[in-house]
Amino acid sequence: MQIEVSRDVFRLAEAFTIARGSRTEAQVLTVRISADGVTGWGECVPYARYDETLDSVEAEIRGLPDGFDRGALQELLPAGAARNAVDCALWDLEAKRAGKRAWELAGLARPGPELTAYTLSLQEPDKMRAAAQKHAHRPLLKIKLGTPDDMPRLEAVRAGAPEARIIIDANEGWSAEVYADLAPHLTRLGVELVEQPLPAGEDDALLGLDRPVPICADESCHDRASLPALKGKYDIVNIKLDKTGGLTEALALRAEAERQGYQIFVGCMVGSSLAMAPATLVAQGVSVTDLDGPLLLAEDRDPPLTFDEAGVHPPDAALWG
């Protein structure tokens, strides 16, 4: 088995800003694993929030032994970007070698399109209103917030897209008090959920807090080991393959989180269609799908995922799985 790692850069259609900073391109690692004349591939996005860099993640991948399977991989690497790219490449390789689709190998029903959120990045209120007007035809908008001055932004987005469903990602930028103060206004404006309002290390403040707008764990939820600490704080968990360390753990996390009564949100980092493709399998029938990464790019993989009025479609075999 041969593993190759390369770096790819995809220009964004416009600058993408969250509470922690801005970017104009997506820098990703692409992993190709070859065996018996067949090659599978996967993609990951190293994330500085989790102390990951392109160099550190590439070193993790290059440090793997010559031969292993997906089961062994779960012990060889921790949850994170490196394991994600390798795990997804192994799924693709297995599907190609078996002459089947990845969803068949996973024992899943044939996947279909899922309505996806479209993300509006953090800007001044007038710019966010203009962005909301531009994308008002989309049924579900996700708003990046997480500052002391978020209400004018939220009001501006609702004015620009009066019919759209709205969810919020505060990116750890609020406190329990800010959430409690904003909650009546969030309800008034039809906000359906708030992602990670508090820093992951300070979310005990959510215990016992009235949650009229459901709260989703993002930075506080990585894999199944995260679940015990979420009890009593969150209503929904955000599953991202770059956090779980691949499709294998993502499917297991979904099953266990559902068993424990959580709703499921399937999200993404800003990456290409190759990164989103395995996540479309996890997203089947969940409460919220947020796999809009390719929609934010000026360039993508070939062939890309299909996005239309029905949402994001599962990948063709030519792309992945």
Image (cartoon, rainbow, N blue to C red):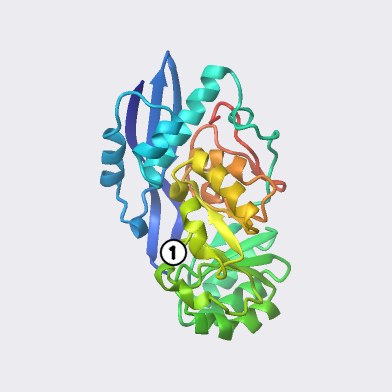
- Few, some or many C-alpha atoms within 10 Å of disc 1 (few <14, some 14-19, many ≥20)? some
Residue highlighted by disc 1: 17
Answer with left or right where residue 300 lies relative to residue 155.
Answer: left
Compare residues 81 and 67 and report the one nearer the observer. Answer: 67
Give the percent coordinates (x, y) of residue 130. 58, 69
Compare residues 213 and 53 and report the one nearer the observer. Answer: 213
Looking at the image, which residue is at 59% across and 76% down?
A: 154
Compare residues 128 and 256 and report the one nearer the observer. Answer: 256
Looking at the image, which residue is at 62% across and 39% down?
A: 306
Give the percent coordinates (x, y) of residue 10. 41, 44
Give the percent coordinates (x, y) of residue 33. 39, 26
Amino acid type of the residue tagged 1 in the rendering: Thr
Q: Quadrant for the C terminus, please.
A: top right
Looking at the image, which residue is at 70% across and 34% down?
A: 109
In this rendering, the answer to whether 179 lies above or below 103 is below
Q: Is residue 9 visible?
A: no
In this rendering, the answer to whether 35 lies above or below 137 is above
Answer with left or right where residue 119 lies relative to residue 83.
Answer: right
In this rendering, the answer to whether 29 lies above or below 51 is above
**Residue 147 falls in which quadrant of the image?**
bottom left
Q: Is residue 286 visible?
A: yes
Answer with left or right where residue 26 lies relative to residue 133.
Answer: left
Image label count: 1
Compare residues 255 and 17 and report the one nearer the observer. Answer: 255
Q: Quadrant for the N terminus, please.
A: top left
Give the percent coordinates (x, y) of residue 43. 43, 39
What is the residue that sits farthest to the top in this orientation?
A: 36
Find numbered disc 1 in the image and state the secondary structure of the residue it sits on.
strand
Looking at the image, which residue is at 44% across and 65% down?
A: 18
